[in-house]
Amino acid sequence: MVDLLSVLASGILVGTVYAYMAYGLGLIYGVLRVVNLAHGAFLTLGVYVTWWLNTTFGMDPLVSILITVPLGFALGATVERTLVFRLRDSPPVTTLLLLFGVWLIVRNALYLIFGGADRSLLTSYSLESLAVGPLTLSIPRLIVSAFSLLGFVVLALMLKRTWSGLALRAVAQDREAAALSGVPVNRVWAVAFGIGSALAMSAGSLMSLFYSVTPEFGARFLLKSFCVVVLGGLTNIGGILVAGIGLGIAEDLTAFYIHTGYRDVVSFLVLTAALVMRRADSD
Amino acid sequence: MSPDSRIRWFPVLGLLLGVALLPACSGGGDDTIRIGAALPLSGKHANVGGFFRDGYQLAVEEANAAGGVEIDGVRRPIELRVYDDKSDASISPSLLERLIAVDGAVALLSGYSTPLVQAQVIVPMRRGIPFMNAGGASKSIFREGNQWVFGALSPVESLASTTLEWLMWEQDQDRLPRPLRVAMVWQNTDHGREYRTGVHDVIEGQADRFELVLDESFEHLSSDHTSLIVKVRSVEADVFLSDAHEPDFLLQHRAYVEQGLGHIAVSYGARGPERSVREGLGEAVSHLVSAQWWTRALPYERSRHFVERYEAQFGGPVTEYYPAVAYEAARALIAAIGNAGSTEPEAIRDALKNLELDDSLLPGGRLYFPEESRLQIENRCVIVQNQPEGGVRIVFPPDAAEGPAYLGS
């Protein structure tokens, strides 16, 4: 029983990390209808900026979010204004390739600057855990889970309660109708890309608490983010949170009760099933 | 063909002729003997690639300082030519082709990492050029009938078998129980599968000594290891063995510590002494036991000489095995060229087959390339244990041990 509870708790903690990684991807797809292959680049930039701030200035990763969030927003909005915007009426594959190119440039730049070695962060709480009854929960993972839930609440409130959120939802539903109603669509696109990128970079910042920092970091998690977004329903932030947690639990139960080697198979089986079911629904 | 089109072809023909003559110009035009390597000097293995370049370079400099290599009664200097393959297995073979065809390299040294070396060995096997491998331990590199690829790195199985030999030795000292309950997890790669084979090869037929209570694989770059660690906890083993590359090792041992596990001995294959590991996990890596292809504390004259020279030239304490094995591989290749007294590939190959360095810095103190293991050295590794204050201590084999291992309860 303790083992089952441990595995469930671990699944929930991992799942909230998946959700955090995926919020930005879902938001950008919802508003711009763009599959952001540069998402991995922003995740990777998040871990590198955090690692660099920590090793250079001793800055705690939790504090570094104060830098990575605005930096992510600025970088994302710039990418949208200077690159994505210019291709807004092109076929989707063009934007897809463009953003893939952005990712490759960032990845190779990181290789040039920092090399390919695995790097890690060590803080005073990196290896701490919290005993809750018979369970032992990792403090860094609890922190990231808390931020993931906080991110969900802030994003949901922003979308529902603010004018910017209303504009984002309006553009997501019907770009032309929103434009006719006076919504500055171009600016909304930049804001959406900026928020999505800021979320990705902050997720990267927090994930540096337990994952190695390498230029391949984004590649490691991009596919998982896609799985969560597709499963949760492309534009549904609440769905993404539930999908992330569900996927985390499914993976951990599979790893524990069937075989650890099948852990990643679960993600891709779920992704395939979700895509097939969506296709069947649309038919 | 019109006169005009013939004229247009002249520059192309000239260029082809030039390229065809290049090997003769660069390889045979002077008395330098060239050896070459395609190393990952950028990309994901850049840090290790640098260690290899330094190790190779040191061996070449030493050989040249001793007057070079005698060929047909004339002493000739060795030149090392290195290209950066950017950690990309798709371009590495073409760089080796260039080293042979354009630079006139008479023998090659390997790059680093099993996938890159697996891609490289196709070239020397096809071209019939001696290739000294110091960067890939997998047996899959050494194919049936291999005549050209020589391995200075013992197989991955040695990591596992030496670890189990150490455990048996501790049992013989009455410091460990019999049978010892072993939980083993391994990365689902060639490296991990060979580690598993090494464990099974020793454990089979040793039921009085070992009981394997968990034998499970995990995927490379897994997003979480907590459920696997919970599984390890549930089998209540005495010893935990894992074979993982660094990113998985860091995540797995983090989960191990977070879940509060403790075993009499914990080993992650070759992982543990790296500086980056202590930077990432701090004191949590104290007392980890690892099997190494080399460690600076080995009490051999050659090893001490290498450490002294390397640190004088490149600075910092040498904590990784990479430059040492690279140095030894290059030293063996240069010795074989000297023994062959020729730069003919077949002569160098035959000299390598007969080579036996009795002053090797590798564990066991001997470097040779036995035919029965397809020209890959099969030395035992050395077992070290991380010390709480930093650094490592050799705990096995007994003739090199610096003291007893700390064993958990």
Image (cartoon, rainbow, N blue to C red):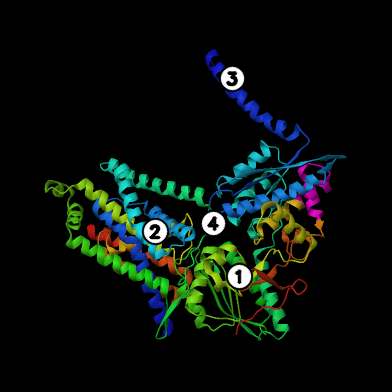
Q: Mark 2 lies on which chain?
A: A
Of the residues under marks 1 and 3, which one precedes in the sequence? 3
What type is the residue that disc 1 sits on? Arg
Q: Where does label 3 land, which residue?
A: B10
Q: Does the magenta stretch include residue A25?
A: no
Tell us which disc is closer to us: 4 or 3: 4
Q: Where does label 1 land, which residue?
A: B196
Q: Where does label 2 land, which residue?
A: A223
Taking B77 as reference, is A231 left or right?
left
Taking A167 as reference, is B39 left or right?
right
Taking A238 as reference, is A46 left or right?
right
Tell us which disc is closer to us: 1 or 4: 4
Q: Does the magenta stretch include residue B333?
A: yes
Q: Which picture quadrant has residue B78? A: top right
Distance, label 3 to label 2, CA atoms, is: 52 Å
Quadrant the C terminus of chain A occupies: bottom left
Q: Is the magenta stretch mostly helix, strand or loop?
A: helix
Q: Which chain carries label 1?
A: B
Residue shown at the point (44%, 58%) measured from the top left: A53
Q: Which picture quadrant has residue B144? A: bottom right
